[in-house]
Image (tube, rainbow, N blue to C red):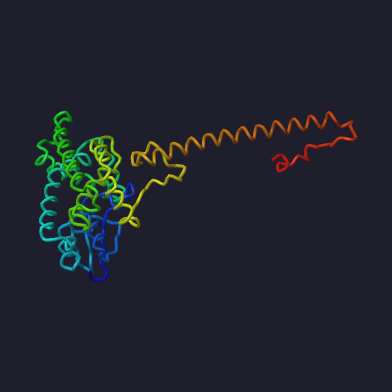
Amino acid sequence: MRLGAVLYVYKGEWGLPSIDFECLRVLCLIKFTRCPVVIETNSNPLRSGAGKLPYLQIGDEKFVGYRQIKKLLDKEGYAINHELRQKDRHLSECFANWVFTKLHVYHNYYLYGEPNNFDITRALYAKRTPFPFNFYYPSTYQKDAHDVISVMGGFDIDDKLENHNVEYITNEAKKCINVLSKRLGRNLWFFGDKYSEFDAIVFSYLAILFKITLPTNPIQNHIKGCPNLVNFINRISRDIFKKEAFNSINTSKDNASPNDPMLTATERKFLESEKKTKILAGIGAVVAMSSFAALKIFYKKFSSSNDHYDGGIHYDDDDIDEDDMD
């Protein structure tokens, strides 16, 4: 790769390197092939020239979107499928197209089409888009999803919710998950011990759908029921994206709320237990201070009633030291 290459992507969440499917699968291309590229997450999508992320910049040249970036990487000697046999390369492309027909409409609907979910998705993109474009730009994803859902899902997201044929797209997505789980088996990658473009695409879809916290996401529990796919997601997140992983929720901060919609189930459980611990500690502190005050009053009265006894130990009020009480 030519010197000075910088990849601009959306910052991640939930322990992932990016919140965006397109950005995530480009990051997989970069990391799987160990292409020497600087990754920049403080990015303005309007600077790409197409109003979208990701884009790769080398000097004054810009390569926007997955296809352009992949084509450049292939040309520069970082082809993601180069270690696969010719037969498996064709299979990788066929499987990728099939997964696209099954998961892409589900991904677009539940992230950008479902009204309650889009409030959260909008906030995720808005936080990663500079002012004042953050008020407008996230809605462009909903507009794009409108076309995807009408063609691939067969309904209009502007219709009433009861007219949204979500059962069909959800069932198709679940069937796809089952096939993927069976295909992966106990392998590290879908084609044995060699990574492929197909692995990058599957990870990018499943990682977001599995990790994101939404009011409605029926496929999330279905993925949880496939331990090998969960291990696949977690292994790539942990081993390949360890440095790029990001989580905006810091569970050690006092201002983090268990009700925050961006929290994962694990983080929410941790914060709830931490809150209980703090409450118990507070009660303990109050009891301790009350006990100390009571003991101080007791010693004061006791010393006053024994002033006539020469052989006893006499305590003045000022002589009581907190360290002695401990």
Above or below 217: residue 195: below
Percent across and percent down for residue 128 are 30, 50
Q: Which quarter of the picture shows residue 81?
A: bottom left
Of all residues, the one furthest to the bottom in this rendering is: 3
Q: In which quarter of the image is residue 146?
A: top left
Quarter of the image where the C terminus is located: top right
Is 166 situated above or below 209? above
In the displayed structure, 255 sits above or below 76; it is above
Q: Classify 136 as above or below 41.
A: above
The quadrant of the image that shows the N terminus is: bottom left
- Residue at screen point 40% across, 38% down: 269
Please provide percent x and percent y for residue 201: 19, 51
* Residue shown at the point (71%, 41%) measured from the top left: 322
Identify the image quadrant of residue 155: top left
Across and down, in percent, residue 257 comes to 41, 39
Give the residue drawn at x 78%, y 37%: 317
Q: Name the one closer to the observer, 237 or 125.
A: 237
Looking at the image, residue 96 sits to the left or right of residue 274; the answer is left
Q: Which residue lies furthest to the front in this view?
A: 186
In the picture, measured across the screen, residue 303 lies left or right of residue 240, that is right
Drawn side of residue 42 relative to residue 51, left or right: right
Q: Please tell me which residue is depicted at 39% across the width and 45% down the height of the picture.
A: 249
Total numbered badges shown on the rendered structure: 0
List x then y, in percent, for residue 103: 17, 43
